[in-house]
Amino acid sequence: MNDLAARFAAQGVGSIFLYTHEAHPGEHYPHLTTMDQKFAHARALRDRLGVKRPILVDALDGACHRTYGSMPNMTWIFNRAGSPLYKSDWTDSNSVENALVYFLDVFNRRRERERLVPFRVERLDYRTSDPDGFQQGLARSGPKAVREFEEAGL
Amino acid sequence: MNQGDLLTRYNYDAFTPDNVLPWLNFANSPELGKPAPDFPLWQLAGTETSLGAVCKQNRLTVVEFGSFT
């Protein structure tokens, strides 16, 4: 997603990472109780995982995250007016890139005076499954996070 | 649910189905193409901004939601 953000920035596409809550709290990154702690975890995300996009932090009660569906790693694309044009219940850079290319082409078509009206489409996209990487993420949080994920059976 | 309960339940301390599943509500999330709710957000330096203010800065804005864990 960092690479995608860099490649599309010159075309007027901004990208942010919105920090929510700890999906898998563990010994090293426990559940959040204060905004100071939330900022600290967000800085750790930036520094340890190399997130290069601007990171913005949601309120401690997750007001934004909850309204948009509370999925642990979803991605939305908004237009300048703040209306969502794309929403995905999981993040996949190929899917996001495909949507950006499409929407940027819509801007071009409008500039060429093509008459366009919106419609809704549903589509099933596919992301790479990375169970080893996921387990490494749980381990970063601590053994408690690893154990609870196994026990949850989700 | 009062604010204290909300903070505790949203920031659950253990990944269990009872703690996690009630929050997953993507099917009822804001509709595409309609003005969406705006919310205050904070930069890492602590400065307050908002989702709407960020969107105004770009033709399109990609927002990835997530956390360290």
Image (cartoon, helix red, strand yellow):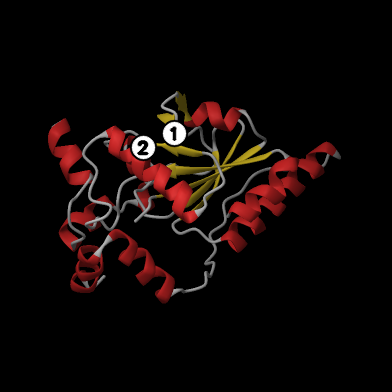
Residue A38: quadrant of the picture: top left
Q: Is residue B41 left or right of residue A144?
A: right
**Residue A115 visible, this angle:** no
For residue A64, side relative to residue A10 (left or right)? left
Q: How many marks?
A: 2
Q: Which residue sits furthest top?
A: B48
Residue placed at 43% from the left, 70% from the top? A133
Query: Does residue A152 appear in this view?
Result: yes
Mark 2: secondary structure = helix
Q: Where is residue A77 shown, x and y percent of the image?
A: 56, 45
Compared with residue B20, is residue B46 higher up or lower down, i.e. above or below? above
Q: Which subunit holds the residue at mark 1?
A: B
Q: Tell me the residue at 52%/67% (across/down).
A: A124
Give the labeled residue for mark 2: A39
Q: Which residue is the extreme one toward the right?
A: A112
Label 2, label 1: how far apart the Cα atoms are: 6 Å
Give the quadrant of the N terminus of chain A.
bottom right
State the residue in front, A89 or A46. A46
* Amino acid beneath label 2: Phe
The local crowd at label 2, few if under 14, some if 14 to 19, many if 20 or more residues have their Cα within 10 Å, is: many
Q: Quadrant of the C terminus of chain A?
A: bottom left
Whether residues under marks 2 and 1 lie with C-beta atoms below 8 angstroms apart, the answer is yes
Q: Which residue is mark 1?
A: B44
In this picture, residue A33 sits left or right of residue B39 = left
Name the mark on residue B33: none
Tell me the subunit letter for badge 2. A
Q: Amino acid at mark 1?
A: Leu
Identify which residue is drawn at 86% across, 40% down.
Answer: A112
Q: Secondary structure at mark 1?
A: loop
Residue A56, position as x, y percentages in the image:
45, 36
Q: Position of residue A128 (x, y in %)?
A: 52, 72
Q: State the image coordinates of residue B34 (x, y, percent, origin top left).
A: 51, 36
